Image: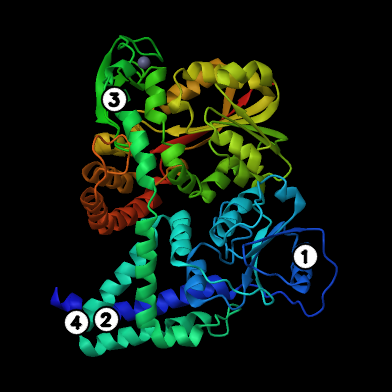
Amino acid sequence: MSSMLGWLPVITMIALVLNGFRLRGQLGWLPVLDDEEPGPHGRFQFVLAKGAELPERTMAAAEDWARRQGLAVLDLIPRGLGVTRALDLARAGLGKDFLANRLASAGGAGHALLVAPRVAEREELIADPDTVTTAGLTTRLKRLACTATDFAVAPGLGALTESPAQRAGRLRAERGLFRAVLPPLVCYAALLTSVVAQPILGLGALALFSLQPYLVFASSPVRPADLHRQVALRLVLDPANWARTLAALWRTRTRGDRVAELRAAYAAELAQGTDRFFESRRPDCPWCGSAALSPHVRCADLVLNKPGRFTLERCAGCGHVFQNPRLNLAGLDFYYRDCYDGEGARTAETAFSAGPAVYRRRAEMVAPFTTPKTWLDVGGGHGHFANLAREVWPETAFDGLDLGAGIEEAARRGWVDRGYRGQFPELAAELAGRYDVLSMFHYLEHTREPFEELDAAAKVLSAGGFLLIEVPNPASGYGRLLRTYWMPWFPPQHQHMIPRDNLVRALTERGFAVVAQDRGRADQSMDLTMALALGLNRLARNPNQPWRPVPATWWRRARYRTIMLAGAPLLVLSWLTDKLAHQVIKRGNGGNAYRVLAQRAG
Ligand SMILES: [Zn+2]
């Protein structure tokens, strides 16, 4: 322990330098508008935060830049933006690849935005927004113009000062309270401990902390007007700033009321028990009809921690694994609620944005066989796959279908060309014969009647069309090893876990021929990490979840955060182990998921 403390000042100094370079890189690429020779303007709309002033020549320069770069949205950053706000901006997600990355998300500078009319008409733009709303608008507009949104430094734009309450509101919206506050807390804890344990080196770390803004902003396109003052007084100003921000966060906490309302609604529902959410147990296998069933996994809802016990049974005849007794419609409604929408919307958005490489590979899988004109993604969620697949297939019309409201939002964003909301088998007649490719990524295992879904797919595809299915692999070795804690069992959402041979047979019976398969290659390399995360989640019990029977006190929140934080080093270790194991698994046949591409008879 003492040797750890001995190294702490050095580690802190290295971290300060590395982070300084990282933040420098986030801002260093920014173009600076040249407003010396004003041209014409008037084709774009400008959104100005309350109090912000944008000279005509800067507007003209912004329009000129947007036209030449083919941009539809341009967030204008004041050149003299203060150190605190500029550092927050550097941490908020902008970066060199922001423009090209369709799924990137970043908060804006909160001063002024150029918006093309075609984008402006799809978003409600309020007059005179405050700086917090303006910063959030950049995040929303990026989704509407995901390959045409960028940042630039505007020398003519004056910097606004942000009140602690505004900063608190913005940080809460951008990252959530915890993620915003944790890094500075860790930093100060490291600095204080360093000074106490090793006064000389500790003072060195403090000096480096003070000087860090020079490292970030020296010859940067952003030149904070208060740079020298902030460096000279950083040891006083920065903690004082955080203290004021935290005080404002505390004063403006609003979540409690909303959660209290939801909590009352959940409590009323749960008072009737969870037995009413189940149908009666069926005696035979829904896949092959065999009566040789045995319990395979008994589990709880480890993701959301909603009450209830679930059983997955396995058929000895065909290997099919399914929820038995299964949830009825009321049960599905109860257990899905606040998972992908409502309370869970933000988590879902983050999770869906995490896998661009996977989306790309899925889209590329059809490349050797066809150039699709029309593609329907069934179970399309919020449209993330369709959005990214356009990089691979820019000429293809991508439509999406889902039960949730996310697919309507996807259509509004333009991530899918058309969004259909409803049950796929019920919509199949309307869509008959319309699509060259139909994809179902981690969809079939959620459905109640997979055969009906496959029948619908056969109907909706054109003759010779392709069906691309990805589902979890119930034969994965991790499934046996980790039991309840294997994420892909995902109770209570997963109704059917389909062995690959079974799926291939069902497709063949419907006139499909399998033309390609990804086995190890479809592996998502997260088994151990997710098992640990589920275990920690179970142990810690997030008190903010409205279905928890007791209100969230500060003590329960602190307990939850402490357990999750204590598990963080283990999560890093298991993540590394998963990545290593993936190098082996991806070359084999036994990943945690598999993909099948099948062609309908022509
Ligand atoms: Zn069976």
In this rendered view, identify the residue nearer to me: 333 or 428.
333
Q: Quadrant of the N terminus?
A: bottom left
**In the image, residue 223 lies at what x, y percent?**
57, 81
Cβ atoms at labels 3 and 2 below 8 Å apart: no
Residue 196: mark in rendering: 4
13 vs 121: above or below: below
Residue 9: mark in rendering: 2
Q: What residue type is labelled 1?
A: Glu
In this rendering, position of residue 599 left or right of residue 88 = right
User: How far separated are the C-alphas under marks 4 and 3?
Assistant: 52 Å
In this rendering, position of residue 168 left or right of residue 138 = left
Mark toward the viewer: 4 or 3? 3
Q: Quadrant of residue 535?
A: top left
Residue denoted by label 1: 63
Q: Which amino acid does label 3 sit on?
A: Leu
Cβ atoms at labels 1 and 2 below 8 Å apart: no
**In the image, residue 41 lies at what x, y percent?**
82, 65
Sequence-wise, which precedes: disc 1 or disc 3? Answer: 1
Question: How many numbered marks are there?
Answer: 4
Q: Could you tell me which residue is drawn at 52 percent across and 76 percent down? A: 82
**In the image, residue 165 lies at what x, y percent?**
44, 62
User: How far separated are the C-alphas under marks 2 and 4?
Assistant: 10 Å
Q: Quadrant of residue 317?
A: top left
Cβ atoms at labels 1 and 4 below 8 Å apart: no
Q: Which amino acid does label 2 sit on?
A: Pro
Cβ atoms at labels 4 and 3 below 8 Å apart: no
User: How far separated are the C-alphas under marks 3 and 2?
Assistant: 52 Å
Residue denoted by label 3: 270
Sequence-wise, which precedes: disc 1 or disc 2? Answer: 2
How crowded is the residue under tag 3: few (<14 C-alpha within 10 Å), some, or many (20+)? some
